[in-house]
Each structure stands twice: as structure tokens, then as C-alpha cells.
Image: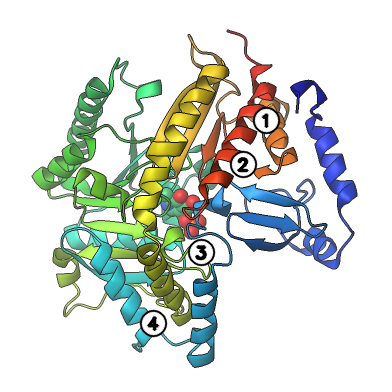
């Protein structure tokens, strides 16, 4: 569709609103639900009626190709029959259980997670999601070291509970400040917008590690319990660390007796074409936090997989933390089935090859056609294009932390994607391309060509 015929954001919103049948679901939602990160007076949620594979649809039957995997969790696609069957079977057998009992689903999920985890990570503490995984990883690091401080990066998201939001580097933290004490921020590597004025990735790696070493010295390395980082930064930009960076972080942790926590809530479980993204660099952290892809979010589940040294600390001393639903049988049965699906359908290798053979070359070709694309980066099925007003200055298409009218160029672009049947994952001045790992190649290519068309809307704001 030529871009001249594209509707404005307002027009798209009106069309969508008119096409909706009034429904009890919508009315009740508008009256009674407060959605995360949203104001209930302005949110216009679509009412999703169903989903399958890489698609979902609303009550009027309007379909979208899900290039967001919802919140980057539906790794095996929507309504995978084997996953649905496993949850049904578990529901017939044992729906719920206090976490001090053992049961087959939880034990098997833990065994499988340890089997795919790197190195000597051999015991799992289960939670209901990512933020609680972070809270517990922090608690474990503090107990293990007897120290308090936690170092995290500015460009990070770790969740919205008290400790996790204090650990978070992005602006979502601000409203919760002053928050929990003992969190210190540093800059991680980001070659496209280097905090260190680097001109190449090798330099970025070296300078980011020197900066971290200096931060450790200034904070007192002996006061630091953990360095917590997203192996590949997710919501803050799909920032793939330069080769050598994670190895460097591991060495600094070893040198100073600091626990290394890899937050793989978003990037783990196949998303990056590895079981855990950190496998790509052959680094073994002390703790990995996971959620989302562990069971594709069909039932809430997260957790921490820990090293033998950390788990040894709780051999005779009780772990001072817990949750009513830790190791929930339904969620764990879904994890067992999901890990089975990753294996049977060879999805880890598939994510890697979709990234290398389809997404990377197509996005690079699209970049040639659209001046507004400043950077293309990612791996596996975890990609971002970063939109700019000017390739030379790299000025972002919308300012940092923009809202309202200031973010309208990105909203227009998102609306152009939705209008063409693609559900995008838009954050700040970026589009994240994060479809299910099971998406068929034709749908993936179709989705990428929708993005190609919709980018004409963003090009209009290019000023370079
Ligand atoms: C890297 C990372 N850590 C933690 C979280 C928090 O997970 P949850 O929303 O399940 O609490 C998220 C959520 O997106 C995340 O991306």
C-alpha cells in the first residue's frame, strides 16, 4: 500500500474502535481492570478472542501476525497443542500443591532446566515470574557473600517488585524512588551509542570493562555481592555484548569474590539461538534468572538456577525465602512440555538459522531502502532496528523517554504495522523483531515485508 494512503494514528484507532463489537469483556475491562504501566482512562486495549501459532485475533476476527511474542515469551507460538495437552493432563492429575511437597512435574522441570543450564548450575528455586526470580537471586548473592551491594547497568529492565525495580536501569525505576538501598549503576557496552566514545566493538569491550573495574574500585569491590546483567539486553535495545565482555565480567567477579547473575528472563530459552544466551560466549555465571520462554508463559513461572557452591550454602541452613506457588505443578508441567517441544522441533538451532539466514539479511536489505534505520542488531529471533532522524548524528527518531506528542512518529509507525496485520513490539525509537521461534519462514518474510512498507511512515520524519 502506498504510504500516501496510510491512515493517521487517530484514523487507525477510530477504524479499529468502530470495527469492534461492544462486548462484556471490553466493558468490564474498561471499568474494572488496571493494566500494567497504563492509565485506565486512556488505554484502548483490543479484546483478544483467540490465538494460534504466530497469530492472534480480536473479537471481530481481525488477525495479527505476532512479531512481539506478546511480551517476548510465547517462544513456541500460541496454543501449541502439546503444551495445551500437558497443562490439561496435569490439571486432571494434580492442580496445585504446597511447595514443601515434591511432585513429578516440578522435579522433572528442575531436572530438565539443570540439564540445559551451563556448567555446574544444578539446582532450581522456582518463582512465579521474572521479578521474583531477580529478588531471589539478589537474596542468594547477599547470603552467599555476606555483602549487600548489587551492581546493575543503566540500560536494563529487571522487573517491577521492590528490589527488581531498584536494580532496573531504565526510566521505569524513577517512580519507585527512593527505592531499596544498595543498588549501584554502571554503563554496559553499546557500540552504536557508546558511553566511552569508542569507534569499534573491540574498543567498546575494553573500555566498558575498564569502566566496570573502576566502578568496582570506587564502590569497594569487597562490598559488592553481585554484578547483575542481562546477557543480551532486551527491552532496553537488544544490545548484544561484544565478544570478550562477558568473559571479562566473569574474571572481575572471580577476582573479587562477586556473584555473577545473568538475567535471562527475556533472552534465555532459545530466544538467542542457544538454550541460554550466555552459552554463546561459553561463560558460566553463578546464577541465572529465567521466566518467559521456560514454558512460553502458558502458566506463570520463573526461577533461579544456581551453582553448586551457592546451593551448598543451603544444605543445612534453610533458605530464607519462599512463595506459596513456588514450583507450581501446572506451570512446571508446562515447562516440561515446552522444553520437550524445543528439543523435538529443534527450535534452538531453528532460532539461530532464522536469525542468520532470514532476519539478518532481510533487515540489512531493508536498511538500505530506509534512511531512518540507523542500526540493525540482534541474534537468533531477538532483533532490533533503531530509528533515527539523521544517520550522521544518530539523533533518535523520538527523544529519550518520550511520551505524548513527542513519541508520535513511533506511534504512527506502530499503527502502520498494525493496519497491515502485524503486531509490532515498539520501544522508544526502536522496533524489536521478536516473533515466536516456531514462525514459518513464509510468515516471517511476510512480516518483514510489512515492516519494510510501514517504515515509509517513519522515513517522513527523517531530517538528515
Ligand atoms: C530481562 C528481564 N528481567 C526481568 C523481567 C521481569 O519479569 P516479570 O515481568 O515476569 O516479572 C523482565 C520482563 O520483561 C525482563 O525482560
Say which label, 2 or 4, has the lower sequence index: 4
Task: Name the image quarter holding the N terminus.
Answer: top right
Specify the label residue 45 is tagged with: none
**Residue reaching furthest to the bottom:** 93
Task: Provide residue 295's location: percent of width, then percent of height.
Answer: 45, 66
Label 2: few (<14), some (14–19) or many (≥20) C-alpha neighbours in 10 Å: many
Rendered position, 418 above or below 83? above
* Marks 3 and 2 close (CB-CB < 8 Å): no
Can you tell which quarter of the image residue 326 is in? bottom left
Q: Answer yes or no: do the residues labelled 1 and 2 have beta carbons within 8 Å?
A: yes
Q: Where residue 406 sits in the image (x, y, percent)?
A: 68, 25
Q: Is residue 436 rendered to the left or right of residue 265?
A: right
Q: Distance between the residues labelled 1 and 3?
A: 28 Å
Q: Residue 413 carries which label?
A: 1
| Image point (33%, 31%), residue name | 187
Front-lying residue, 176 or 247: 247
Instruction: Pick whichever of labels 1 and 3 is earlier in the sequence.
Output: 3
Q: Mark 4 points at which residue?
A: 105
Label 4 element class: helix
Closer to the chain start, of discs 4 and 3, is 4
State yes or no: discs 1 and 4 in contact (Cβ < 8 Å).
no
Residue at 78% x, 49% y is 44
The reply to whether callout 2 and callout 4 are in contact (CB within 8 Å) is: no
Read off the residue under disc 2: 424
Per the image, label 1 sits on a secondary structure element best described as helix
Compute the Cα span from label 3 to label 2: 19 Å
Q: How far apart are marks 2 and 4 (CA)?
A: 34 Å
- Classify mark 2: helix, strand or loop: loop
Q: Which of 179 and 302 is in front in this view?
A: 302
In the rendered structure, find residue 297 and report the number of the disc placed on it: 3
Going by the image, does 150 lie left or right of 121? right
Amino acid at each position: 500500500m502506498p504510504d500516501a494512503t496510510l491512515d493517521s494514528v487517530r484514523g487507525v484507532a477510530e477504524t479499529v474502535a468502530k470495527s469492534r463489537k461492544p462486548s462484556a469483556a471490553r466493558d468490564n475491562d474498561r471499568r474494572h481492570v488496571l493494566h500494567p504501566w497504563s492509565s485506565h482512562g486512556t488505554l484502548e486495549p483490543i479484546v483478544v478472542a483467540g490465538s494460534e501459532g504466530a497469530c492472534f485475533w480480536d473479537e471481530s476476527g481481525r488477525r495479527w501476525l505476532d512479531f512481539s511474542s506478546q511480551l517476548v515469551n510465547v517462544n513456541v507460538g500460541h496454543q501449541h497443542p502439546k503444551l495445551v495437552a500437558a497443562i490439561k493432563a496435569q490439571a486432571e492429575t494434580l492442580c496445585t500443591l504446597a511447595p514443601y511437597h515434591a511432585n513429578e512435574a516440578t522435579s522433572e522441570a528442575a531436572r530438565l532446566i539443570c540439564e540445559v543450564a551451563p556448567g555446574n548450575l544444578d539446582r532450581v528455586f522456582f518463582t512465579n515470574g521474572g521479578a521474583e526470580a531477580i529478588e531471589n537471586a539478589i537474596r542468594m548473592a547477599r547470603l552467599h557473600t555476606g555483602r549487600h551491594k548489587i551492581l546493575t547497568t543503566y540500560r536494563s529492565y529487571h522487573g517491577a517488585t521492590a528490589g527488581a525495580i531498584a536494580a532496573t536501569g531504565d526510566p521505569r525505576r524513577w517512580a519507585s524512588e527512593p527505592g531499596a538501598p544498595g543498588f549501584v549503576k554502571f554503563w554496559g557496552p553499546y557500540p552504536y551509542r557508546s558511553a566511552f566514545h569508542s569507534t569499534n566493538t573491540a574498543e567498546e569491550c575494553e573500555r566498558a570493562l575498564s569502566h566496570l573495574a573502576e566502578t568496582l574500585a570506587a564502590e569497594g569491590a569487597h562490598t559488592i555481592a553481585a554484578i547483575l546483567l542481562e546477557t543480551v539486553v532486551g527491552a532496553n535495545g537488544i544490545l548484544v555484548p561484544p565478544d570478550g565482555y562477558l568473559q571479562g565480567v566473569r574474571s572481575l567477579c572471580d577476582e573479587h569474590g562477586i556473584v555473577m547473575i545473568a538475567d535471562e528472563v527475556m533472552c534465555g530459552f532459545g530466544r538467542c539461538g542457544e538454550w541460554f544466551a550466555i552459552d554463546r560466549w561459553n561463560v558460566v555465571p553463578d546464577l541465572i534468572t529465567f521466566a518467559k520462554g521456560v514454558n512460553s508463559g502458558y502458566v506463570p513461572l520463573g526461577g533461579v538456577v544456581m551453582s553448586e557452591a551457592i546451593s551448598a550454602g543451603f544444605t543445612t541452613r534453610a533458605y530464607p525465602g519462599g512463595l506459596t506457588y513456588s514450583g507450581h505443578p501446572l506451570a512446571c508441567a508446562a515447562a516440561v512440555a515446552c522444553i520437550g517441544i524445543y528439543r523435538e522441533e529443534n527450535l534452538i538451532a531453528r532460532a539461530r538459522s532464522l536469525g542468520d539466514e532470514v532476519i539478518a539479511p532481510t533487515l540489512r536489505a531493508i536498511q538500505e531502502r530506509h534512511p531512518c534505520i540507523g542500526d540493525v542488531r540482534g541474534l537468533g529471533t531477538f532483533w532490533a532496528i533503531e530509528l533515527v532522524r539523521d544517520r550522521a548524528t544518530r539523533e533518535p527518531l523520538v527523544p529519550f523517554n518520550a511520551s505524548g506528542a513527542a513519541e508520535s512518529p513511533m506511534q504512527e509507525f506502530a499503527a502502520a504495522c498494525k493496519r497491515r496485520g502485524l503486531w509490532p513490539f515498539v520501544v522508544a525509537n526502536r522496533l524489536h523483531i521478536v516473533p515466536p521461534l516456531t514462525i514459518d519462514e513464509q510468515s516471517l518474510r511476510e512480516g518483514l515485508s510489512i515492516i519494510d512498507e510501514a517504515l515509509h511512515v517513519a522515513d517522513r520524519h527523517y531530517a538528515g
